[in-house]
Image: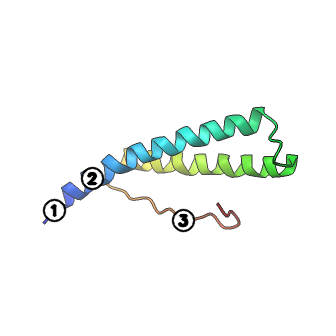
Amino acid sequence: MASELDWQALLKAILEPLLEDFQYWFSRSRNLLEFQEMAVLSPREQADLLHRVKSAQEEVAAAQSLLQATDGNVGVEMSTTPGINW
């Protein structure tokens, strides 16, 4: 049976790169939404999506900070923010 330390190491090994991937893709999305006009979105839809991406980036940054501050002794709940449907 796996020890608690094994589970913590596994969680950290999976969560750190996953959060880095989220930051990478949110950064790319944010860059496109900030600097290019999306023909498939109205200006309001693009602004709303940009706001949601920025919020998601902040949530990922908070999760990364918690993971680092606790040396991997934290989990992340992937729930949706009220009013935001991904």
Q: Where is residue 10 in the image (x, y as percent from the top left)?
A: 27, 53
Q: Give the mark, 1 or 2, whose residue is nearer the N terminus.
A: 1
Residue 65 percent coordinates (x, y) = 45, 45
- Secondary element under disc 1, as helix, strand or loop, is loop
Which badge, 3 or 1, comes first in the chain's sequence?
1
The quadrant of the rendering that contains the C terminus is bottom right
Q: Distance between the residues labelled 1 and 2?
A: 10 Å
Name the residue: 47% across, 51% down: 63
Cα separation between marks 3 and 1:
27 Å
Please name the residue that numbered disc 2 is placed on. Answer: 10
Asked which quadrant contains residue 82, the reply is bottom right
**Residue 53, position as x, y percentages in the image:** 66, 48
Q: Tell me where residue 2 appears, x and y as whole percent.
A: 16, 62
Residue bearing the label numbered 3: 79
* Residue at image coords 48%, 42%: 21
Residue 70 visible in the displayed image: no
SS under mark 3: loop
Quadrant for the N terminus in the image: bottom left
Which amino acid is tagged 1? Answer: Ala
Q: How crowded is mark 2: few (under 14 residues within 10 Å), some or many (20 or more)?
A: few
Circle on res. 2: 1
The mark nearer the N terminus, 3 or 2, is 2
Q: Is residue 24 above or below residue 58?
A: above
